[in-house]
Each structure stands twice: as structure tokens, then as C-alpha cells.
Amino acid sequence: MMSTSGFQRVNGLKLWVHRFREESAPPSGLTILLLHGFMDAGATWDLVAPALARGGHEVVAPDLRGFGQSDSVGHGGYYHFPDYVADVAELVDALAPRRLAVVGHSMGGTVAALYAGTYPQRVERLALLEGMGPTATEPHLAVDRMASWLRTLREVPRVPRPLTSLQEAIERLSLHHPRVPREVIESRARLLTRANEAGRLVWAYDPLHRTTAPTPFHADSFKEFLRRIECPTLVVGGGPTGWHPADEAERLACIPHSTRFELPSAGHMMHWTEPSALAERLFSFFSEAPVQRPRNMASEPHHVGTELPLSGMPGSVPSVGHVGGQVSRTQMNPNAGSHPQTAGGTVLSRVAPPAGQVPVGPTRPAAGIPPQGTGNGS
């Protein structure tokens, strides 16, 4: 297994990109782009990516802006979904894959869906891992969100506060992910921290992420992006302890060719808790033969001179998949009227957080630290 990393300049920022490739496997021609969630990093795909690479796929996992080893936006900047989508678009142009599949977890799933809806012809297959978007923002909360954002902008320090030790990072991760095995938490803590210029250990993210996002999330607009997705889409849930927006079924019904698969005991951080089962299901999904589809010039690459010929059309029928000892029914969604099939768990409703609190969910799942911090570290 060859695993390499390096910087790629995207929209004026340097993104750290992790690459996985199995030299002994015949190349499949498919590039799989893995997009991590909030307070996470591309490095934590290490439990899933090698299994995909062994199929001959080129696997690429960037640290999104403001996370891991990638650049932060700097003073005067901020992090919005369109910023991440723009980064993905330019990164794809730089990679110039012959065929492209995108996997997004949580926040990364929202970014992946927005990108696939904007450029449907560029994505051959899409997998959304509890990445169906955050809770919709009620209109009457918009003013409070803006006020909270302005307040937290003044309160949150821009320089990460040092941790006392790696043990502190481990304990804080354990606190927010009590169902994740201890040995996994310990390995994740090493990947989600870094040494600052003084050699002190800090979290590998921009503290600006701890502020309350000011922009309301409009579910109806997001559904329009979902309706524009043309490729086969695998939607993976983590069971009753995972993240499920109240209108999840409505959102899923908007995706023209979706398959629902459930890992009933995985929870939200499925790539940490059940990486083998997840990788097996993704591997099977990406191994399905692509079907040619007509090119839509309206969704061609946005940079002149960059050609990314892609193929793939849904042609599957209802099937039964067996992964990790659990049998989960999957159902193609050929129209906008069906509802997701689940196995081993129920869809849970979540309510919007009080004004001034960072929501814990696909916008900001607590994948590393508490959304507002603990007062002794960033």
C-alpha cells in the first residue's frame, strides 16, 4: 500500500491531501474523493481508504480548509458551505480524474451533495454517510444566529490554546464519543492534533470553527441540489444513535437514484466505529459497472480546457446487502415519492439548538471537541 501526502493549492489556500494507492492492484480508473466532517480531518479516513485502494482505486482525502494541516482562511475570512464546494471544484480540476466518485461524511456529505448537484455530470457515484444536511433553520432564529455569531467572533481566540498533553485530547474525545473504542480514540487523537510553532500540542483546526455559523440553513434550497444529482447515490445511516434530521425521509426522496443502507450500531462516526463494514459496503457500491449517459454541457467542468469525461447511470434494482454480520435492505428510489428503508434502527428527530449554541449535527458534528470548547483548550 502506497500512502502519500502533500499540499495542493486551491483557491489561494494550501490543502493537505492524503493519497492512498495499491501499487499491486490493476488500476480501476476511478478516483474516490473522501470528504471528512466537522472537527475531523482527512487523516481519519485511514481505517477505510486502504480497503478501497486495494480495489485499484485512487483514493484521495483532503484536509478541508481550516482543518488538519490545511491552511486556515486568515483574519477577515470565514467558513461557509459555498467555500468548501469551491475548494472541491478546484481540487477536482487539479486532480483531473478520468472517473470520479465522492464520499462525504456529515458536513462533508453536505458539501458532496452540493457539488454533485451543481456538477452532476462530473460525479459517477456518490456516497453520503449521515451527510443529508443539518437541521433547517427556522426564519425567526436568523437574527439570533447573526447576533450570536458577532458575539462569538469577539470571544473566540484565533490562536489555538495548547493542550496539557495528548492524554487531555484523548479524554476530551472520549467524553464526546463514549461509544468509540478506546484504542480508536487514542489513534484519532494523534491524527487530530498537531504541534504549534512553539512545539506545544494543539487541536488541528482553526478556532474560528467554534463560533456560531451566521448563515441559516435552508432545507428547501438544499433539496433542489439533491434533485439535480444524476448518479447512483448510496446513503448510509449509523442507526438510532446516528444523526437524522427530522425531514430526512423527504430529503432522501429528492435524490433520483438513491439506495439506503444502515449500519445499525455504528453511530454517527461510522468510519471510526465500523470501518471494515463501511469499507466493504462502499467497495461493493463502487464495483458496480458504470453505464454510459449522455453529456450535459450545462454541467461540464467550470475551468476551460479541463476535460473530465465521466460515465455512470443508475440501473440497479432492489437488493439485499450483507455487511459486518448485519443484513440491511437497500431500495432504489426511482422517483421522488418513496421513503428510505431502514434496518435495525429508527429515524430520529432532532430539534434546533438554542440561539448562540453551535448545532451538533452534519453542520457541526462534535467529531473532535465540544462545539463551544471546555474553557481550557480550543
Image: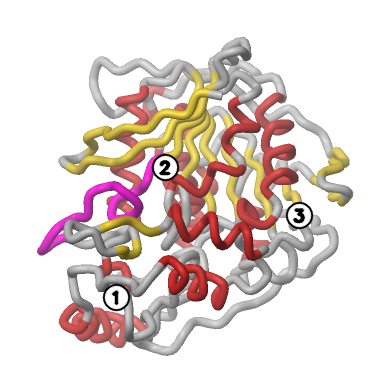
Coordinates of residue 323 in the picture (x, y in percent)? 82, 44
The quadrant of the picture occupied by the C terminus is bottom left
Q: Where does residue 33 sit, x and y in percent of width and height?
A: 48, 35
Question: Which residue bears the numbered disc 1?
Answer: 211
Q: Which residue is mark 3?
A: 262
Q: How is the image coloured?
A: secondary structure
Q: Circle 2: is it few (<14), some (14-19), or many (20+) Cα within 10 Å?
A: many
Q: How many marks?
A: 3
The secondary element bearing badge 3 is classed as strand
| Location of residue 324 with respect to 54 vertically, above or below | below
Residue nearer the viewer, 369 or 360: 369
Number of the front mark, 2 or 3: 3
Instruction: Indicate the amino acid at tag 2.
Output: Tyr
Name the residue carrying label 2. 115
Q: Mark 3 belongs to which amino acid?
A: Glu
Magenta span covers which residues?
62-77
Q: Tag 1 or tag 2, which sits nearer the N-term?
A: 2
The image shows residue 63, relative to residue 19, as above or below, that is: below
State the image quarter where residue 311 is shown. top right
Which mark is first along the chain, 3 or 2?
2
Residue at the (28%, 57%) spot, across then down: 195
Left or right, 197 with respect to 300, comes to left
Q: Amino acid at mark 1?
A: Thr
Image location of residue 263, percent across then percent down: 76, 55
Residue at 31% across, 70% down: 215
Please identify the quarter of the rendering in which residue 212 is found: bottom left
What secondary structure is the magenta-colored segment mainly?
loop
Viewer-side residue, 91 vs 172 = 172
Q: Nearer the viewer, mark 2 or mark 1?
A: 1
